[in-house]
Amino acid sequence: MLRAILLYLSILPILLANPSYAVSKKELAAKDLQLEERLSQLESRFLTGDPAAEQLIKRNYALEVTVRSLRGEVEQLMYELGQSNKKIDALYGDIDINLQRIIRLEHQLEELNSAFENSENSFISGNAPLGTSPGGDPFENTNNEDNSEKLDRNTDETLSQIPSAPVFKEKTIDVQAAYSDLLKLPEKGKVKLREGDYLGAQLDFEKYILERPDADDIAIVNYWLGESYFVRNGFQKAANAYIASLSIDPRGIKASSSMIKLATSFAKLNNPESCKIFNAFETQYPNATELEKAKANKEAKKVGC
């Protein structure tokens, strides 16, 4: 009996505590529901019911639209600026090439003038009348001392009028080193193409073509020159370079690639010859690789040929 009483007393606090715990948990759950309802009411009011909230939302939306529009305009302006800079770089490159050509022509003209002056001086000295006086009277061939002195004096004067041989400055340019640098230009240009220095590549190719127009690899260099223009959207100059490559070596290493790029350049220029070139590709180059044929067909489909 005593044992049962002790057990009841030990369980009683637990029984008393459980109802209070259950009540507090229910209250917390009810408060959570109330908070959720209030939050939903506030959100509904903010989004739809409150005029001030609606005005804020509209202004925020209008600002977002304006920002997106301005961002698009800025990106467009940045793109146009980049294109303008590329055109300016290309113009500077053309000016540099033309200046090099002018300097080369000036050197050739100076050499021609120098050669002409030398030949003129040689002609004058070879036809100078050594037996006449400055007044044009012939010397008297006598044996007296006066005539002898006169002859010697006039002879000295005539010889003094003959110009001396021109003195040329010795050139210290290492011709072999310059020629070696010239031969390296095509490879340097291709490296610049891979690195994105398209203007530098163009200048290297053009200098090589200008200095070595009869080189064995001139058709290949013309193809790479076309590539330096093509990547900068200079399609007309690119087409000219591809045509030069095909004209020099229509069966060369880069001939089939030049034909594809020529047709693509014409397509960019809206030239109707583009489709004719694409259609004639496989007939013109039946031994082209499958990759080249696939590329030609892909480019032709792009332009609707």
Image (cartoon, rainbow, N blue to C red):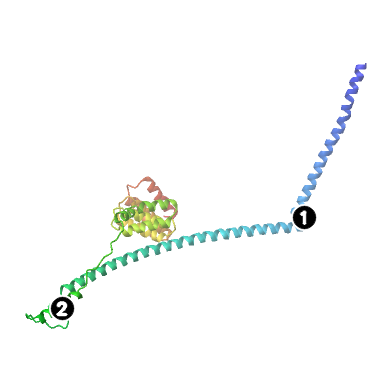
Quadrant for the N terminus, please: top right
Kind of residue sitting beneath label 2 = Arg
Quadrant for the C terminus, please: bottom left
Q: Residue furthest top?
A: 1
In this orientation, which residue lies closer to the viewer: 173 or 269?
Answer: 173
Which residue is painted at 90% across and 25% down in the image?
12
Q: Tell me if residue 268 can be seen.
A: yes
* Residue 51 in the figure: left or right of residue 300: right
- Reply above or below: 203 against 21: below
Q: Where is residue 171 in the image (x, y as percent from the top left)?
A: 29, 61
Q: Which of marks 2 and 1 is in front?
A: 2
Q: Where is residue 165 in the image (x, y as percent from the top left)?
A: 22, 68
Between discs 2 and 1, the one toward the N terminus? 1
- Rounded to the nearest angstrom, the CA distance separating label 2 from label 1 is 125 Å
Kind of residue sitting beneath label 1 = Gly
Residue for badge 1: 49
